[in-house]
Amino acid sequence: RWFGRQAIPLFAQRYPQFFAAHRATRPFLLTLNSIIHPDVRKLYPGADVPDFDFDTSSPEVLVMGYRSKRKLCAFALGLMEGAADHYGEVAGFEHPRCMHRGDAACEIRISFQPQPAQA
């Protein structure tokens, strides 16, 4: 998880086009399957990227399904935290279903809040 969070500033520097089109974490995450991962596959043929599904029915909570044979959900959570840092937000997570606990997929519920102002 730590590694994923620390990787986002490097990704934002190297691939600014993925980040610049958004002002918040939620819309950025919603581009994973449609924009980011297809470009990753172009840059790195044969890359094994995870599959996400999204439930956007709540404006307060984004529900993400995560599937990957590598089961790197902790890394994915770190990337999400790093993205929230990038957009000046704090992400809160619930992880009620997890492939490491025998579930077919992970379910990650994410809420976003602005980062508190520093004194």
Image: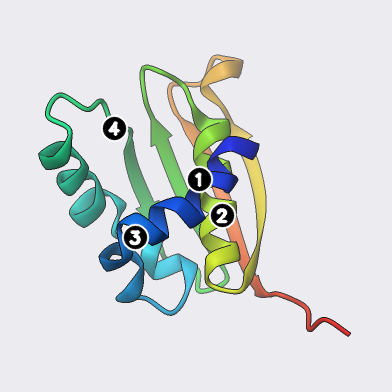
Q: Quadrant of the N terminus?
A: top right
Which disc number belongs to residue 7?
1
* Contact flag, marks 1 and 2 (Cβ < 8 Å): yes
Please give left or right for residue 22 compared with residue 88 in the image: left
Looking at the rendered structure, the kind of residue marked 1 is Ala
Instruction: Please tell me which residue lies in front, 16 or 31.
Output: 16
* Contact flag, marks 4 and 2 (Cβ < 8 Å): no
Which disc number belongs to residue 30?
3
- Residue at (46% x, 21% y) in the render: 71
Mark 1 to mark 2 CA distance (whole Å): 7 Å
Query: Nearer the observer, disc 4 or disc 2?
Result: 2
Looking at the rendered structure, the kind of residue marked 3 is Leu
Q: What residue is shown with label 2?
A: 82
Instruction: Please tell me which residue lies in front, 1 or 109.
Output: 1
Which disc number belongs to residue 49?
4
| Secondary element type, mark 3 | loop
Q: How crowded is mark 1: few (under 14 residues within 10 Å), some or many (20 or more)?
A: some
| Secondary element type, mark 1 | helix
The picture places residue 30, in percent across and down from the top left corner, at 34, 60
Say how many tags the image has. 4
**Mark 4 or 1, nearer chain start:** 1
**Mark 4 or 2, nearer chain start:** 4
Looking at the rendered structure, the kind of residue marked 4 is Val
* Contact flag, marks 3 and 4 (Cβ < 8 Å): no
Q: Residues within 10 Å of mark 2 (few under 14, many from 20)?
A: many
Mark 4 to mark 1 CA distance (whole Å): 16 Å
| Secondary element type, mark 2 | helix
- Residue at (51% x, 21% y) in the render: 99
